[in-house]
């Protein structure tokens, strides 16, 4: 029985069912960290419909009302905790850009290394290398907000959080990972 419980708890941790924690929120309050957030809840499915185009949101899976509210709640949490965001970067996918915009943490710039890896394994090595470099070199003084996809977070750190939730990272230049996981955040606070 004990082994089953440990396996279940490990599954919950890896798949992001844990809520925000004080370690993650405190790290962000001190500045100089990175928070990588999965986009808000979308229409059901995985990946995008056949023939989708990045320049046409109508062809993509997009946020639903619940996903929009999750994104707003996460942004409110950051503001209530007085967490300074110096830079906001997002995948080019509309659901990520909208999540970042609804969080209201600053001007959103798109960054292709955050683009969806689902169904694009050939891009993994290049995108991971660029993200690890960006994260390792972040100095602040505020925090860097990255909005991306669950597949990317799973590939980069083997953590796939719930929608509109994130993982807080500390830069770790000179290490293979380029970062250290220090906590989590979620819309519930």
Image (cartoon, rainbow, N blue to C red):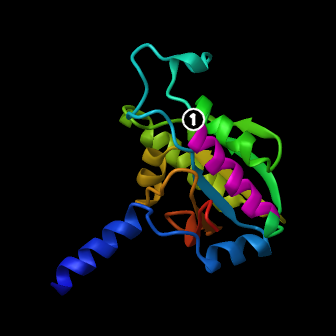
- The residue at the far front in this view is 65
- The residue at the far top in this view is 51
Badge 1 element: loop
Magenta region, main secondary structure? helix
Q: Quadrant of residue 173?
A: bottom right
Residue 76 against residue 128 in the figure, above or below = below
Q: Sort mark 1 into few (<14), some (14-19) or many (20+) by Cα contacts within 10 Å.
A: many
Task: Verify whether residue 71 appears in magenta.
Answer: yes
* Quadrant including the N terminus: bottom left
Task: Verify whether residue 32 appears in magenta.
Answer: no
The picture places residue 167, in percent across and down from the top left corner, at: 56, 63
Q: Quadrant of residue 62?
A: top right
- Whether residue 173 is visible here, answered yes or no, is no
Whether residue 69 sits left or right of residue 149 in the image: it is right
Q: Residue at x 66, y 52 (%)?
A: 134
Quickly name the residue at label 1. 63
Q: Residue at x 64, y 61 (%)?
A: 136
Whether residue 85 sits left or right of residue 45 in the image: it is right
Whether residue 42 sits left or right of residue 65 in the image: it is left
Residue 169 against residue 151 in the figure, above or below = below
In the image, the segment drawn in magenta is: 63-79
Q: Residue at x 65, y 42 (%)?
A: 99
- Whether residue 79 is visible here, answered yes or no, is yes
């Amino acid at each position: 029985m004990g082994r089953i419980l440990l396996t279940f708890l490990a599954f919950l941790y890896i798949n992001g069912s844990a809520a925000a924690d004080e370690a993650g929120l405190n790290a962000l309050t001190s500045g100089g960290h990175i928070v990588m957030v999965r986009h808000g809840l979308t229409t059901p499915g995985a990946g995008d419909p056949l023939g989708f185009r990045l320049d046409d949101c109508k062809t993509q899976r997009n946020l639903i009302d619940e996903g929009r509210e999750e994104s707003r709640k996460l942004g409110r949490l950051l503001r209530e905790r007085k967490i300074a965001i110096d830079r906001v970067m997002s995948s080019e996918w509309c659901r990520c850009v909208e999540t970042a915009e609804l969080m209201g943490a600053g001007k959103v710039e798109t960054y292709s290394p955050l683009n969806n890896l689902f169904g694009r394994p050939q891009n993994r090595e290049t995108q991971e290398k660029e993200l690890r470099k960006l994260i390792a070199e972040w100095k602040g003084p505020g925090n860097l907000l990255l909005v991306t996809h669950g597949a990317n977070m799973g590939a980069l750190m083997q953590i796939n959080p719930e929608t509109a939730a994130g993982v807080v990272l500390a830069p770790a230049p000179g290490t293979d990972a380029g970062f250290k996981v220090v906590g989590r955040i979620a819309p519930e606070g």
